[in-house]
Structure formats: C-alpha cells, structure tokens
Amino acid sequence: MNRMVPPPPTPSHVTEDGRAIGPVLMELRNITLRFGGVVAIKDISFDIREGEIRAIIGPNGAGKSSMLNVISGFYRPTEGEVWFEGARRPPMRPYKVARQGIARTFQNIALFSGMSTLDNIMTGRITRMRSSLLSQALWWGPAEREESAHREAVEKIIDFLEIQHIRKTPVGRLPYGLQKRVELGRALAAEPRLLLLDEPMAGMNVEEKEDMSRFILDVNDEFGTTIVLIEHDMGVVMDLSDRVVVMDYGRKIGDGPPEEVRASKDVIDAYLGVAHD
Amino acid sequence: MFYREAGDFKTSYRDDSQTFPIGFDRYRYYAVLVLAFAVVPFVIDDYWASAIFVPFLIYAIAAIGLNILVGYCGQLSLGTGGFMAVGAYACYKLMTAFPDLNIVVCILGGGLVTAAVGVLFGLPSLRIKGFYLAVATLAAQFFLVWLFNKVPWFYNYSASGQISAPARSVFGLPVTGPGVEAWAQYMICLVFAVVLAWAARNLTRGTVGRSWMAIRDMDIAAEIIGVNPLKAKLTAFAVSSFYIGIAGALFFAVYLGAVEVGEAFGIQKSFLILFMIIIGGLGSIFGSFAGAAFLVLLPVLLKNVLVGTLGWPTDLTAHVQLMIVGALIIGFLIAEPHGLAQLWRIGKEKLRLWPFPH
C-alpha cells in the first residue's frame, strides 16, 4: 500500500435522525504506542468521519485515553500515521494541533482553577486571538475590539451550556458537574472541527448524565462538530454514538455501529470474561 | 450603603470587563489618583519623599513586575535584584553615552535592556519548573551582580566602582542629580508607577494574561487548548523584567543617585520584593502596591515607635523588624496565601452585602 496517498473519498450519507455524515475527517493508520517495554496501543487503525459521534470503549487500561492523547498530539505514536483533513500530520506540539481545530476535555478535570468561568472559556479562544502585546497593554483599538468580539462568542457558549449564573465565579469553587460543563465550554470555545471528550460523564449522577448527553448531542447537531467520545456507561455510548471502536489490552477488538459491536463475541468476552472449561 | 452593583447596569462587554465594576470603587480610585497627583506633591517634604513615597512607588513597580512572573505566570524568580541592577546600569550607560537623551527615554531603555536579559535568563523555564527554576534565576542574580562589579566598562572606569547619576531634567525640571526637589522625584516615580500599573492591569485581564494564568494553573492543559508555552513564558519574563528594569533605573537615578551594585541590588533586594508580593498578594496588582506599602512603612513605623517613643536601641529594633517580617510571611503563607489583596477582596464582598449577612 502506498502510504503517501490520501485516503479515498468515502461516500457521505445521512443518518436515521437526519444528521449528515461527511467524508473521512481523520484517519489513524496502524498506530502503535510504546512506553519502554509497555505497549499501550498495538497497531490500531480506524477513521473518524465528519459530523459523526465516534465512541471509543473498552475496559480499564485498554489504551483509550492514550489513543485520545495521540489524536490531540500529546503523545507521539511510536509507529503509524495520523491523517487529518486529507493530509498526513507531521509530529507537532499540542498547541499546534489545537490550532488545526482539535479541542479536548480531560478525564480528570483540567480547568484553570484560579480563573473565573468566563476567563476559562475565553482562554479556549486563544487560538483565534491576534492582537499584539502593546495594543493589549493599552487596551485600546484592535485589542479592545477583539476582546469584545470574542466575549460575544463566549457568551453564546455560556448561554448554550446554561451556565450564565456562574460566569464570574472562580471555577475552583464550582461543584464537579458544573466544572465538567465549563470544561466542555472551554473546548467548544475554540470552535473545533474535531472535539475529543475523555469520559465527560465520569462520576456524574443520572440527571447530570442526561444533561451532558443532551449537550453533546446538541453540539453535534447545531454546530456539526465531529466528536470522539470515551465513555464507560454503555447505555450512554449505545444511545449517543454512530460508530464504536472497542479496545482491549491496546488492541482493537471491534469497530462498527453500536448494535453490531454489542453483538460481537470478542467484545462480550472482553467485558464479561471468557469461560475456561 | 453606597457600595452596590444594584442599578449600575452594564450594557456592553467593554463596560462589563472594566477594572472597577462598582461605582463606589471607581470613584474611590479617582479620588486616590487626584490625591496622589494634586495634593501630595504640594505637601511632600524631603523626609516623606525619601523615607516613604519614592521607595514605595519604585518598589511597587518592581513588585508588579515580579508579580507578573510569579503571581500570574507561576514561574518563581529570585533574580529580581540582578534584573534591577541591569535596569540601573543600562540607564546609567545610556545617560552617560548620550548626554542629550531625555531621562525618561533612558529609563525606558533600561527597561528594554532588562527585558532582553530577562528573556535570556527565562529560557531555562521552558525545561525546568519550581525550585529548580528558582535556583536558575538565583544564578542570574549572582552572575549579574558579579558582572557589574568585575567589568569596569559598566561603571565607566570610575575609581570607586560606583555609578552616579548625572543631573537630568524633564520639561526643565531637574529630576536626577544633586539638589533635586522632593516633589519632582515623587512625580516622576508616580507617573511611571501609575502608567505601568494601568498597563499591567490591561495585560493581565486580556489574552496575554489569560495565557499566563493558564500556564500557572495547569501548563499541560494550557498547551493542549492552544497556549504556546514558549511564547507565554517568555513574554512573562520579558514584561516582568521590563518592569523590574524600570524600577531599578528609577531606584538608581532618581532615588539613590549613586549606587554600589552589591549593596543596592544584592540578594536581599530579591527577597524583599518576593516578600512584598507574598504579603501583598500573588496575582494581584493591588497586592503589589499593598505589599510594597507594607514593607516600606513597617521599618519606618517601628523605628518611630520603638526607637523614637520607647527609646529602644536601633539594632534591637532592626532585629525585631526581621522577626516580625519573618513571622508575617509564615503566617500569610499558612493562613492567606493570596495576601493582603485577598483580605481586601473579602472585605469588599462583605461590604457589598452589608448590613445583611448573605
């Protein structure tokens, strides 16, 4: 196979609920990730299409978060290639990956605890800020206009996530569920093409999970954002996602629509264990 | 009763993001400015200028500078004294090499040179953090002081090894050299302090400030959402050193007039300014002023009370002062790491609701 050729265009289609699934946005080819002797990811390939919600599931330690870290540029794969928007992505620093339009949230909340909700979400727009140091120091002209324009965009996200009341509260003081929401807001502020969510519902009660699921669906629906989601709650995964990748011990053991994956013997074995008789 | 947001509606994002959103605060701030510009210069005498106001303003500038680096960007520095020396010597070299150059330009030039030196010594911050970075900046402190002592070119080969500021004036008003009026010294420091504090406030509430704070609070997350750590850390070092350099230039040219580097810009100065921002409040412009005021006023107050009124010996008073400062720093670090500025904020929160508890 000639690896320098971009992936062939895949036909677009429309889902049952009327969302348009476009061509391949990102393709991971034969990704292997080793830390010394430990193999975290072993020769995994899959693709992510524009507009879809792609879930990555698997038991603890399967390598799901490592996979997300490879996509967001935090880990450099030992072997394999990442293709984004039809071009092979050279190894680059995470902040440059962010500039390409990939945003993420973290499994353990990684908000800037000393800053307010508003400032946290404003920081998410940093890839779009252009004004010079001097004009910012004077708070005049371009810097002031830029600040107000971005504030307007951020206020839309604050409205969307229904967190108006905590706009000026330092995020360190917020309860867990709201912090998760602010973190989603910070990722959304970048207006990403690809949004990576690492266990957005971990540690939430049923009500908070329902809220978060609604936000994820709305983000996908209203902004057309492609979403990659790691989640442990099978009910949520099966309801939300269009396609699911299943990982176990760093290997891919399943890939396809939720119903298909759920019926797969390998997946059932990985989750429930295999009877040895 | 006047300290309320009620009825003060913000109709634009510009209004909403202003520094003093509460009307009462705003007017109090204008009142302080009027007092500082229109009243103090007419009543100030030599003692008040040289014991309190001039050092307070200069240390406030240095504290704002260090606060940008430590309080906002989270990069610990112990090289403040060395960077102040760079500002002082750069200013001195500019003043003597270009006698026609305006003193304000020389002071700003001192700041710019210090910014460049600060970026140079900030480079290790890209690799090392915390205590290790503090030690690297400590190396800067000792190296710079050694350099200005060893290389005679810096002090123009003067026999004493000191540098002394030639007489210069702004708008025909002498501000450096012998026989300068107290109020002229005060005014030039005040103008620098007000303008620089205002610029620091603008920087810290905007994009640059947010990227600094993001690096401080969680550097990995900051990089993943798109903050360039190299740019954020080096701009923090540059801006911080610019402020500290200007403080050093003013300290030398306007305040002391003649300087011996090890004495004026030694490691004690680095610690003094670090204590100012710890007591005043990390990550706060007001805190920089509060901390500077506190540590400038405390010795004066103790001297007046203990030596003047109670008749204690001077050396005992000096020791008592060290003990008080040490105890306060431990106390603040344990009880209120955000310093006087946080106490001030809590006070304002309470005042907003007064006389009701909630």
Image (tube, rainbow, N blue to C red):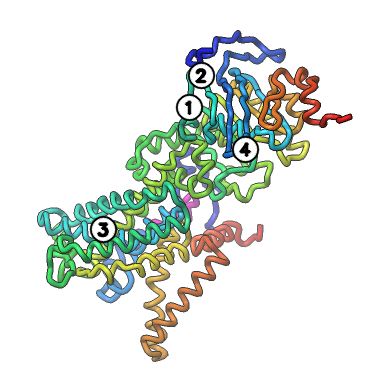
Closer-to-camera residue (A201/A96)? A96
Task: Give the side of residue A14 with respect to residue A26, left or right.
Answer: right
| Residue A125 x/y as whole percent | 49, 34
Tell me whether marks 4 and 3 sit on the same chain. Answer: no
The residue that appears at 63% across and 34% down in the rendered structure is A40
Label 3 marks which chain's residue? Answer: B
Question: CB of mark 1 within 8 Å of CB of mark 4?
Answer: no
The residue that appears at 66% across and 57% down in the rendered structure is B358
The residue that appears at 48% across and 19% down in the rendered structure is A87
Question: CB of mark 1 within 8 Å of CB of mark 2?
Answer: yes
Q: Residue furthest bottom?
A: B311
In the figure, residue A242 lies in which quadrant? top right
Distance between mark 1 and mark 4 Cα atoms = 30 Å
What residue is pinned by disc 4? A38
Question: CB of mark 3 within 8 Å of CB of mark 1?
Answer: no
What residue is pinned by disc 3? B87
Q: Hey, what amino acid is under mark 4?
A: Val
Distance between mark 4 and mark 2 Cα atoms = 31 Å
Which mark sits nearer the N-terminus, 1 or 4?
4
- Within 10 Å of disc 1 (Cα), the crowding (few <14, some 14-19, many 20+) is some
Label 2 marks which chain's residue? Answer: A
Which quadrant is the N terminus of chain A positioned in? top right
Q: Hey, what amino acid is under mark 3?
A: Gly
The residue that appears at 73% across and 41% down in the rendered structure is A203
Magenta region's main secondary structure? helix
- Let me know if residue A186 is in the magenta part: no
Distance between mark 2 and mark 3 Cα atoms = 50 Å
Which mark sits nearer the N-terminus, 1 or 2?
2
Closer-to-camera residue (B250/A90)? A90
Q: Residue furthest right?
A: A277
